[in-house]
Amino acid sequence: MEGQPHSPELNWPQAVESLAEELTSQLGGRPDLVLAFISPDYKKYFELITAALKDRLGGALIGCSAGGIIGGGQEVEQQSAMSLTGATLPGVSIETFHITNDSLPDLDDAPGSWEKLMQIESSEKPSFILLCDPFSFKIDSFVQGLDYAFSRMVKIGGLASGGHKAGENRLICDDKVYRSGLVGVALSGNVQVDSVVAQGCRAIGKPSRVTKCDRNLLYELDGKPAVNVLREAIERLSDGEQKLARDAIFLGVAMNEFQEKFVDGDFLVRNIFGIEPMSGALLVGEVLRSERTVQFHIRDAATSRDDLRAMLKRYVDKSGSMASGALLFSCLGRGQHLYGRSNHDSDCFRDFFGDIAIGGFFCNGEIGPIGDSTFLHGYTSSFGIFKEKE
């Protein structure tokens, strides 16, 4: 697997040829799968670029417009750029797809409806890479349906970026370019795709039990008003952390209710949007259920850095650092905006995995698992780590 860097100073035919030449040279031939991430200033050329890539490289192709590009160890944000990440995948079945809302089964349909939609059976144990337009597709319902039909199989990806309204983003699937829906690829056979999701948060206070809620309104924790529990957690912080909490406070929802102890990474982190004026309930970006364990979280650059390193170390300690390549789907709110410098997450990944190829883009939302379920995240880095099956 190889990822090639941007070519911001070249016009698109030169950029495509330069990137394709370097990619095929490093792979020793044409790739079986290519992912193309292209800045939105090229959008009027997307059809031409797609045709040129298919002609030059062949194989399966997916991609999208991207407000920031990752490739060749570089992260290029808000600049003219494109990157190609490709792989030769012997013994791997590769199925690309484009899906619209109209084709989605109901969530209470049988798993076979989702297998029919994806044109692959769960017995093949596929992994999915998903690229979605944020303005036109029900991604939450889609990943919920995929989890139902393809339980415990990896789904990673991101929401296309660079566009500011419906119709401005671009999605690539083989020789076609779309302005809506979702594109992706299902991989099965001799490939293992692992995931690491770093949400960039640190827990504060202590875990609490939801004792009163109504969908995304949180009224009580452990029988006390939730807003009071939040204030108590913030009051225990240092002055600097209290200032941070006023601007960046979140609620983590535990994914495994049977755990006795929780650490960072065990929670699905969701925004707290404010306080409902009439009731004093916290307005949370997640539908809650009574008796769920939750804990408040904060986020800043140092916390995000520590969390990323902790998640990568946890993976390497368990699964080792040998890999053929990786994809990184990172939030537009990370990168230079968060860390004050370029290449932070790519550099951190290389600290643990060495000089393996990593490509990807900065997303309007990131797709990846927490526990056994897949979610759409914000402010995260979602990695897909590729290796041959053992």
Image (cartoon, rainbow, N blue to C red):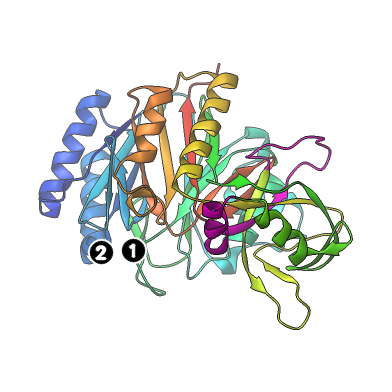
Residue span colored magenta: 238-266
Residue type at numbered disc 1: Gly
Which residue is denoted by mark 2 in the rendering?
43
User: Which picture quadrant has residue 56?
Assistant: top left
Comparing 185 with 240, the one in front is 240
- Residue 246 included in the magenta stretch of the image: yes
Residue 162's disc is 1
Q: Position of residue 322 (x, y in %)?
A: 45, 18
Could you tell me residue 213's position as x and y percent? 82, 67
Instruction: Tell me, yes or no, if residue 386 can be seen here.
Output: yes
Asked whether 63 or 253 is in front, the reply is 253
Residue 318 percent across, percent down from the top left: 60, 20
Is residue 217 located in the magenta-colored stretch of the structure?
no
Q: Residue at x 33, y 30 (%)?
A: 357
Residue type at mark 2: give it. Answer: Lys
Q: Residue at x 56, y 47 (%)?
A: 201
Residue 274 horizontal side relative to residue 176, left or right = right
Spot the residue most to the bottom. 278
- Quadrant in which the N terminus appears: top left
Residue depth check, mark 2 versus mark 1: number of the one nearer the observer = 1
Q: Do the CB atoms of the residues marked 2 and 1 lie less than 8 Å apart?
A: yes
Q: Is residue 72 above or below residue 204?
A: above
Tell me the quarter of the image containing the C terminus.
top right
Q: Residues within 10 Å of mark 1 (few under 14, many from 20)?
A: many
Q: Nearer the viewer, residue 130 or 250?
A: 250
Question: Considering only vertical position in the picture, is 188 above or below 120?
Answer: above
